Amino acid sequence: DQQVKQNSPSLSVQEGRISILNCDYTNSMFDYFLWYKKYPAEGPTFLISISSIKDKNEDGRFTVFLNKSAKHLSLHIVPSQPGDSAVYFCAASVNFGNEKLTFGTGTRLTIIP
Amino acid sequence: DTGVSQDPRHKITKRGQNVTFRCDPISEHNRLYWYRQTLGQGPEFLTYFQNEAQLEKSRLLSDRFSAERPKGSFSTLEIQRTEQGDSAMYLCASRDTSSLEETQYFGPGTRLLVL
């Protein structure tokens, strides 16, 4: 039972353009959502998060949008840079991050110079 | 470096052997989590501690797995009688529940290969 889904295994974007990564979830109890970035042979690095009381959170080039009615969130990266090439994981938790994270399967983002 | 550290980074073992991994969380982080990541999947929750108390264990954590956090600081994860299916990246994360931050911070992981 995959409660957090990232349906695009890979995405290629031209440098300087916008990258949009998508994530869907099924558990309506999730109230906190995070995006992590992972390079090979390293642990996930936290990027940005959003709680269910908001619909948008912005941090520099990264913006996360949450659509609770559609149970959908997205990560926008603009402008995309070569160093953004990595695997991006969407994660969700119940009770505002106090408990375990449930991760999606990841999307590999490749930025084309 | 004040991040989460894990040791060893890599471990190769033969089927049937026991292995133990260590995680040192960020200082003062009272919550510590263990996850497992297999190829092509996202990390999957195994267990977590609030200080020295183990609060939840996933059904993924069979009887061969045991985790401890004896003094509420570092933690160990032991796998007894390893099987080839145990081959994975084992990730540790920590969090400070007393701060406004609700983010779990991950270590670099221990990659286990069971032959």
Image (cartoon, rainbow, N blue to C red):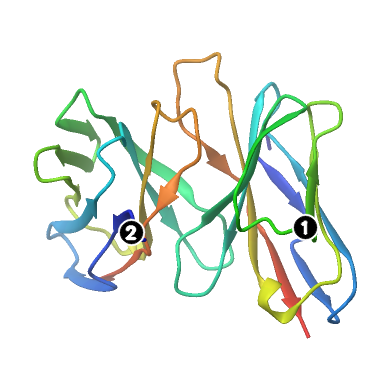
Q: Work out whether B86 lies above or below B92.
A: below
The residue at the point 22 percent across, 71 percent down is A11
> What's the CA distance linking mark 1 and mark 2?
40 Å
Front residue (pair A56, A24):
A24
Snapshot quadrant of residue A83? bottom left
Q: Position of residue B3 (x, y in %)?
A: 64, 38
Which residue matches tag 1? B63
Residue closer to the observer: B17 or A79: B17
Q: Is residue B70 left or right of residue A94?
A: right
Where residue B71 appears, as percent x and y from the top left, is: 85, 26
Chain ID, mark 1: B
**Disc 1, SS:** loop
In this figure, which residue is indicated by the disc labeled 2? A84
Left or right: residue A73 versus residue B47 is left
Which picture quadrant has residue A12?
A: bottom left
Q: Is residue B39 left or right of residue A17?
A: right
Residue at the limit of the structure toward the bottom, as seen here: B115
Q: Is residue A113 visible?
A: no
Q: Residue at x 50, y 40 (%)?
A: A100
Mark 1 or 2: in front is 1
Q: Please name the residue shown 67% across and 55% down the image.
A: B61
Choose top left, top right, bottom left or bottom right for residue A27: top left
Image quarter of the C terminus of chain B: bottom right
Residue B92 spot, x, y in % from top left: 64, 47
Callout 1 amino acid: Asp
Q: Position of residue B15 (x, y in %)?
A: 83, 81
Q: Residues within 10 Å of mark 2 (few under 14, many from 20)?
A: some
